[in-house]
Image (cartoon, rainbow, N blue to C red):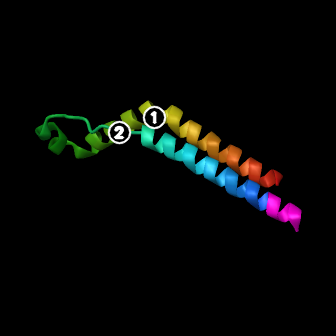
């Protein structure tokens, strides 16, 4: 029973640490909307959207990888309990 409580406390602390770090990553991602000519956007909104998504994804890819690794580490810690 004591080990179960100890493991529960560890799991809770792992979760708190994970959420704090994940929030820091999320807060650092600030996509900026491209400022293009409205006529160009209206002429081909799909291209505008795809360009925006591609640029944002490329810019923040390291953050996405960091968040993925953070979640992976969190899961591995829980599995070890």
Q: Is residue 65 left or right of residue 72?
A: left
Residue farthest toward the left in the current orientation of the protein: 39
Question: Which callout, 2 or 1, points at the residue further toward the start of the chain?
Answer: 2
> Which of the 4 image quarters holds residue 41?
top left
Q: Is residue 62 magenta?
A: no
Work out how far the residue at label 2 is from the one at label 1, CA to CA, in angstroms: 9 Å
CB under 8 Å between callouts 2 and 1?
A: yes
Q: Which residues are magenta?
A: 1-6
Residue 64: image location, x then y, percent = 52, 39
Can you say which quadrant of the picture contains the N terminus? bottom right
Q: Is residue 48 above or below residue 76?
A: above
The residue nearer to you, when weighing 12 against 64, is 12
Report the residue at 79% width, 54% height from top: 79
- On the image, the x and y values in percent for residue 18 come to 62, 48
Please identify the quadrant where the C terminus is shown.
bottom right
What type of secondary structure mainly makes up the magenta span?
A: helix
SS of the residue under disc 2: loop
Q: Is residue 8 above or below residue 50?
A: below
Is label 1 in a helix, a strand or a loop?
helix
Q: Residue at x 73, y 56 (%)?
A: 11
Which residue is the site of mark 1?
60
Q: Which residue is mark 2?
A: 31
Between 45 and 16, the one nearer to me in the picture = 16
């Amino acid at each position: 029973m004591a080990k179960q409580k100890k493991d529960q406390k560890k799991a809770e602390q792992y979760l708190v640490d994970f959420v704090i770090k994940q929030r820091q990553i999320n807060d650092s991602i600030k996509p900026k909307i491209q400022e293009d000519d409205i006529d160009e956007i209206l002429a081909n909104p799909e291209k505008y959207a795809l360009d925006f998504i591609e640029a944002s994804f490329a810019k923040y890819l390291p953050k996405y990888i960091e968040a993925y690794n953070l979640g992976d580490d969190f899961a591995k810690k829980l599995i070890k309990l």
